[in-house]
Image (cartoon, rainbow, N blue to C red):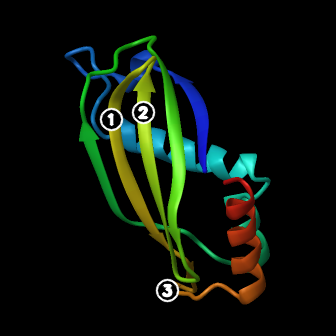
Amino acid sequence: MKLKTEYRVIYGDTDQMGVVYNANYLKMFERGRNEFFRQLNFSYRKLEKNHDILLPVVESYCKYLKGARYDDLLEIITEVVSLNPVKIKFEYEIRRESEIVAEGYTLHVFMKNNKIHRLDKDVYNNLKNLISNQK
């Protein structure tokens, strides 16, 4: 399932050339992830607070196709493409109207006490069901 989030580029997102600075696309990916979970009524905060589980990025990739500029209205399209009790992978597409500006992915592991952690069965099944029910 793909969920969409709108984002308007601010001056602080751009570099000296007037285009969105490359690392800021990763921030847009993060915004897409957070909104993805929020739309499922599942939050990072609850995962951290209730289960002491963190979800760090262990791998990221972004392909830049077009330059986004100040005041562009972008659409961040986020999808979970794989999930197991140890890791989750998101794919993203950032669009300006009908054209793809950037695309990429992030891979995350579930961690507890600074170690990779296998999600408890109930937490994993809850997350899996929330994602599956949206497809």
For the residue marked with disc 3, what is the amino acid?
Ile
Q: Residue at the top extreme?
A: 71
Residue 102: mark: 1
Dot 2 falls on a residue whose secondary structure is strand
Where's residue 5, x and y in %? Answer: 60, 33
Residue under the point 57% across and 86% down: 113
Q: Earlier in the sequence, mark 2 or mark 3?
A: 2
Q: On screen, 84 above or below 99?
A: below
Q: Which residue is mark 2?
A: 94
Q: CA distance from mark 1 to mark 3?
A: 30 Å
Residue 116: mark: 3
Q: Residues within 10 Å of mark 2 (few under 14, many from 20)?
A: many
Dot 3 falls on a residue whose secondary structure is strand
> Disc 2 vs disc 1: Cβ atoms closer than 8 Å?
yes
Q: CA distance from mark 2 to mark 3?
A: 30 Å
From the viewer's perspective, tell me whether residue 83 is left or right of residue 119. left
Where's residue 3, x and y in %? Answer: 61, 42
Residue under the point 46% across and 38% down: 28
